[in-house]
Image (spheres, helix red, strand yellow):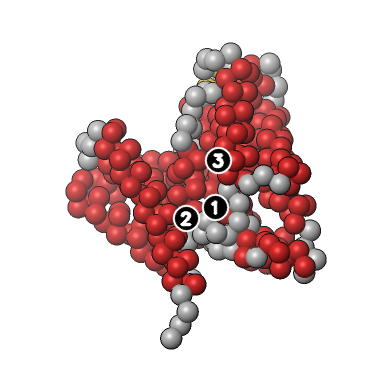
Amino acid sequence: MRGDSGVLLGLLLVAILFGILIGPQFFRPANLELMARQTVIVCVAALGMTMIIVSGGIDLSAGSIVALSTVVTAVLLRHGYDPGLAALGALAAAALCGLMNGLLITRLRVVPFIVTLGTMLLVRGAAKGLAEERRLEAPLTWLNGLLRTARDGSSLGVPLGVWLTVFLAVIVAGVLRYTRFGRHLFAIGSNERTARLCGVRIDRRKLQVYTAAAAFSGLAGVLEFSRLSVGDPTVAVGLELDIIAAVIIGGGSLSGGKGTVVGTVGGAAIMAVIQIGCSQHGLPNWVQQIVTGIIIVMAVALDRWRQAAFERPSK
């Protein structure tokens, strides 16, 4: 819990900093709700990425899968499908992308970075082809309200998408902490060879984790569709970097074997608070990109520092 506490403390300090720079209005309920909505999309995809990074892998195709999911949702709605079926169709398309990643990694024995770098372009191209390289308008349904506060008070003043994210975070935390699947992911990430000798079916677990993580990115795509109300094949470019950074800021290790859901949620919240704070403080977009880039570099550097401290022999 020490690492998680550090992330939550960092979130508090960042929020206080922008509260001082912007003023009390930064903490108004409407602005807090905006930050929560901004956090949700990155956080949902980062929950899946947490499982991948814990297992020692990485997925650079997450942003492209988000874009594909918005397009699939819009296409199915335009063809008259029920909103629930449209969302399930988007999740199924995303899961197939993850299964493809897992098969390429396990069958070709190619490192995940290279495989998912290729599928990042492949999936983005598929999204553009399916959408005919344009934004797809879709009929309004209850999907469009997932990131809006219900006026009847049924969601207690918080968008349904936020509650869904909290529910999924609890589920993933339980899976990582209390299930055999979770223990196997930590074992693979810590030492794949030892895990194999202990009887862990490495290839099966990798197929499962990449498929599940892609489904989480697909759900993030449905939430992105809710926010945009269109299917956009150009959306979420570079989002995979925010997703990975959220996991690393939250205590995950690119070397594998480490990661927590609480840390990931805190990391995603830090990213959202900084982006919204910079925007409301009047900083231009290029400054926001520089700040985000610095955060990503610092997150990776922090991961390497933690790894070196762990490996340093004690006197």
* Secondary structure state at the residue bearing disc 1: helix
In this view, 103 is above or below 88:
below
Within-10-Å neighbours for mark 2: few <14, some 14–19, many 20+: many
* Marks 1 and 2, the one that precedes in the sequence: 1
Instruction: Determine which of the numbered discs, if any, sits on residue 253 in the image.
Output: none
In this view, 87 is above or below 98:
above
Residue 155: x percent and y percent?
Answer: 52, 44
Q: Is residue 213 visible?
A: no
Tell us which disc is closer to us: 1 or 3: 3
Give, as a three-letter code, the residue at label 2.
Answer: Ile
Task: Tell me what residue is drawn at x 57 percent, y 37 percent.
Answer: 117
Q: Quadrant of residue 33?
A: top left
In this picture, residue 56 sits left or right of residue 301:
right
Instruction: Determine which of the numbered discs, if any, sits on residue 60 in the image.
Output: 3
* Secondary structure state at the residue bearing disc 2: helix
Give, as a three-letter code, the residue at label 1.
Answer: Val
Disc 1: which residue: 166
Which residue reaches farthest bottom? 315
- Are the residues flagged by discs 1 and 3 in contact, CB closer than 8 Å? no
In this view, 146 is above or below 156:
above
Task: Tell me what residue is drawn at x 33 percent, y 47 percent.
Answer: 294
Residue 247: x percent and y percent?
Answer: 49, 53
Residue 226: x percent and y percent?
Answer: 53, 31
Asked whether 218 or 76 is in front, the reply is: 218
Residue 173: x percent and y percent?
Answer: 60, 60
In this view, 284 is above or below 111:
above
* Marks 1 and 3, the one that precedes in the sequence: 3
Disc 2: which residue: 248
Task: Tell me what residue is drawn at x 60 percent, y 34 percent.
Answer: 118
In this picture, residue 259 sits left or right of residue 80:
left
In 3D space, how far apart are the residues under numbered discs 1 and 2 (Cα atoms)?
A: 20 Å
